[in-house]
Image: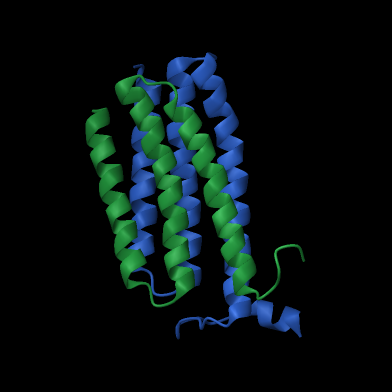
Chain colours: A blue, B green
Amino acid sequence: MNSISIILLIIGVVFDLFGCIGLIRLPDIYNRLQSATKCVTLGTCSILLALLLHYGFSEVGIKALIAIPLLFFASTVGAHALIRGSYKFGIKMTDKTVVDDYKEVEK
Amino acid sequence: MIGILLYILIGLSFLCFIRVLSGPTMADRMVAIDIFGTLVVGICALLVLKTGRLFLIDVAIAWIILSFIGTIALAKYLTRKKLDE
């Protein structure tokens, strides 16, 4: 393996680690989702990019290149729909929240 | 090298299961399942590098689509609407 793909793999795993620590530590579903989705999506995209750099434009490399935008859009759209659904469902925010703009938009 | 990274990712998926077991609401559990699906895609990509079995990238792509469908279904259920509205 060349050194660029090794660096990309380590960056990806470190971003996954930070995302999962945020999933455990943060107090609220909204904080958890915005931490975990962004960090884990970027980390997994970095791992797939390392796969593309290692195999080149062969069969596996092209499939990894297809999987990167698929994962990016699927994860972010799913997180947005889930957070909107949980707001409509009435899940409370934590006490430390200072601003809620979406409530004024809904009125 | 890749084995160490694989063990780290498997440990992170157990962290997701802690959140699944202890989530206060149902949406917390679904967030953890969604993040677990994204982690499994990374595990599949690392297994391609580790073992050289090239079909595992197809498993990763299928897992992305199934995780997306599950998340959208739960979001529609939370807004109390039917799936075609």
The quadrant in which residue A82 appears is: bottom right
User: Which quadrant holds the N terminus of chain A?
Assistant: top left
Find residue A3 and report its horizontal and vertical position in percent. Answer: 35, 20
Q: Residue A31's spot in the image, x, y percent?
A: 47, 68
A71, above or below A8, in the image: below
Q: Residue at x 47, y 64 (%)?
A: B30
Q: What's the residue at 41%, 31% (across, down)?
A: B45
Q: Residue at x 49, y 42 (%)?
A: B63
Q: Residue A94 occupies which quadrant of the picture?
A: bottom left
Q: Position of residue A96 (x, y in %)?
A: 45, 82
Horizontal placement of A15 versus B77: left or right? Answer: left
Q: Nearer the viewer, residue A73 or B82?
A: B82
Most foreground residue, B72 or A101: B72
The residue that appears at 47% across and 34% down in the rendered structure is B59
Give how far across and how far down residue A51 sits, in percent: 44, 25
Q: Give the mark count.
A: 0
Above-or-below relation of A20 to A2: below
Image quadrant where one finds the C terminus of chain A:
bottom right
Q: Relative to A72, is A8 on the left or the right?
A: left
